[in-house]
Image: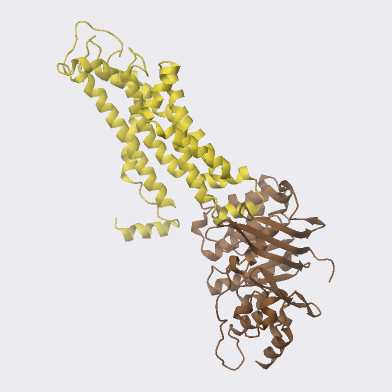
Amino acid sequence: MTDAAHLEAAVAAGRPRRARPPGPLVWGGAILGLSLFLAAAPSLVAPYDPLAFDYGAILQPPSPAHPFGTDNFGRDVLSRVIHAYRIDMGIAVFATVVPFVLGTLVGAVVGYAGGLAETVFGRVVDAVITFPFLVLVIAIVSVLGPGLINMYIAVSLVGWVFYARIVASEVKVQKRLDYAEAGRAMGYTHARIVLRHLLPNAITPAIVYWMTDMALAILLGSSLGYLGLGAQPPAAEWGVQIAEGKNFMATAWWISVFPGAAIVVTGLGFSLLGDGLAALLRVRR
Amino acid sequence: MSAPLLSVRGLTARFRAGGREVTAVDDVSFDVGEGEVLGLVGESGSGKSVTLRSLLRLLPSGARVEGQALWQGRDLVAMPDARLRRVRGGAISMIFQEPMTALNPVLPVRVQIEESLRAHTALDRAGRRARARELLDLVGIPDAARRLDEYPHQFSGGMRQRAMIAIALASEPRLLLADEPTTALDVTIQDQILKLILDLKDRLGMSVVLVTHDLGVVAETCSRMAVMYAGRIVEQGGVREVFASPRHAYTLGLLGSVPRAGTERSALRSIEGTPPGLAAIPPGCAFNPRCAFATTVCREVRPDLSPRTPGHLAACHHSDRVAQASLAA
C-alpha cells in the first residue's frame, strides 16, 4: 500500500496512523521471546539431560546426534547451552531489576531535591565510578563469597548508581518545566509531583539503559561464572561452560564456542530491544 | 467596596543572583475585590509574574518573600506549607503562559483533570469521571467525551489552554491567577480564551488577577489595573481612569505606544531606552533615565504611591504635569 493509501485508510478509520514498530524492536523482541521460551521450558527443546555424563561419547565433534558436540564428560553441549538460558536470563533480570528500581527512585528524589542531597550523591557517584565496575563487583563477591545470590547483591550495590545518575539529570530538567510548576500551583504534594508527573517523563533513558544493562549483566554473569565467582559447576551456565572448555580449545573448540555464541546472540537481542525502544519512545514524544 | 477577597500589603520578593541579592518585587500592595478582574501590566522583567507567583510562594528555592497577602483572614506568605498546598489549586488556582508545556505530556487529559478533582474535592471515582467531562464541556471543547482520553500533544494551543483552565477550575476556586494566559496563542484564539475566562468568572463568581503586557487585553477585560515597573507598582486605578488620564509618565508612555482605533492617525511613540536590570535599579524614581518629565528630585527621591484622585494612585513626582500632557496629546 502506498503512503497516500495508508493515510486515507487511517483517516477513514477515524484514528491517527500508527507508525510501524522499528525493525530493531521486532528483531530484539523475537530473539528475546525465543530466549525466554528456552528459559521457561528448556527440557521441551533440549535433547539430553544437561548434567548426565556419557563416557561412551566424550569430546565428540558436532554431529547429527550431538549438533553442538559433547564435552569431556560426554555431556551434550547443545542441551547445556539450552538449559543455561534459565540461569543467564535470570542473571539478566535479577542482576538489573533492583538497581533499576532503586536507582530510579534515588535519582528522582536527588534530582528533585537538589542542594545537599545532590552534593552527597555526586560524591557517592564519584566514589563508585572511580573503580572499574568488574573490579568492584569481584571485590564485593570475594568478601561475600562466590555464588549467584551474592553476585546479585554485589551488582545491585554498585549498579544502582548509574540509573540514579541518568534519572537525576533528567528529573532536574523536567522539574523546571511548566507542568511541574503547574503541579505545585495545583497544590499537589512533592511525592505526587515526583512519582506521578516527573518520573514518567524522566524514565525513558533509564529504561533504554536497562536493556543495555541486561546485556552487560549476562556478560558479567558469564565472566564471574568463568572466574568461578558466579554460577558454580556443574550448573549449566555459559561462562562456566566456556571455562570448562578452555583446556580443550585446540582440540574441542565446540565446548566453548557455542556458549560464547549464545552470549553474543542474547546480548544482541537486548541491545536491539534497547535501540528499538529508544526509537519508539522518541517518536512518541 | 466591601472587604476585599485578597489584600496584599508590602509584598517583597528577593532572589540571590551571582552572590548578591536582587529585589524582583518591591513593596507591592493591592486589593482584589469579589468578582473583580485586576490587570497587572508591565514589560518583561517588571516583576508582574513574580508578584503572582509570590502569592502562592511558587518561587525557586532561595527566594525570600516578605510582606502580607491576606486571604480570608489568613496570611498566605506566613502560612505553613501543608496548609498552603490546600489553598493552591483549591481556593486559588493558577493558569500559565505556555499551554504547550504546562500540561504533563505523558498523561491523558482526563487523568490530569481527575487528579485535580481528587486533590481538591470529595467526589468518588464515578463522580470525578462525570465532572471531568462537564469541565471540558464548560471550557468549550467540542466532543468532550472523546477528547478526554487524548493526550496533550493531540490538542491545539488554544485547546490546551482550555484544558488547563478546566484543570484550574476543577476545585471551583474563588480566585484565578492568570499568568499571561493568551501570550502564546494566536490573536483570534486569544480573544476566545479571554472571553471564556470572563464568562466563567461571571458564571462561577470568581475573581481574576490577570498578568499581561498587552494593554489591549487590559482594556477589554479588566475593571482595575496596576502598572508595574522595575518591581514596583507605579500606577493603580480603574481601567477607565487610567486610560483616560494616566498619572505616571511610564503609563503615559505605554499608552502612547499602542495604536488606537477611531482617532486621527498619528505616529506611535516608543519609550526610549530599556528597563533597568534588577541589579542596577537607578536611585530615586526607577523610571527617571527614560522619562521626559524627569527633574533633579526624580533622580534623588523615590516617589511614594499615593492617591491622586479617589481610587487612582500614582508614584510620580510630576503626576499633574503628566496628566496635563495626556490631555494635550
- Looking at the picture, how far across and down is residue B60, in whole percent? 61, 54
Q: Give the residue at x 75% y 68%.
A: B30
Q: Is residue A20 above or below residue A4?
A: above
B230 relative to A123, above or below? below
User: Could you say where residue A98 lies in the image, as x and y percent from the top left?
Assistant: 48, 30
Per the rendering, the colour in which chain A appears is: yellow
Residue at the extreme right of the image, as rendered: B2
Task: Spot the residue most to the left.
Answer: A251
What color does chain B have in the rendering? brown
Residue A41: x and y in percent read 37, 22
Numbered circles on residues, count? 0
Q: Can residue A90 be seen in the rendering of this structure?
A: no
| Residue A8 in sight from this viewpoint | yes
> The C terminus of chain B appears in which quarter of the rendering?
bottom right
Q: Is residue B73 left or right of residue B253?
A: right
Q: Is residue B234 above or below residue A90?
A: below
In the displayed structure image, the side of residue B94 where residue A91 appears, left or right: left
Above-or-below relation of B93 to B82: below
- Colour convention of the picture: by chain
Observer-nearest residue: B297 or B217? B297
Residue nearest the observer in this picture, A67 or A144:
A144
Image quarter (top left, top right, bottom left or bottom right) of the N terminus of chain B: bottom right
Q: Position of residue B189 (x, y in %)?
A: 56, 71
A164, B277: nearer the viewer: B277
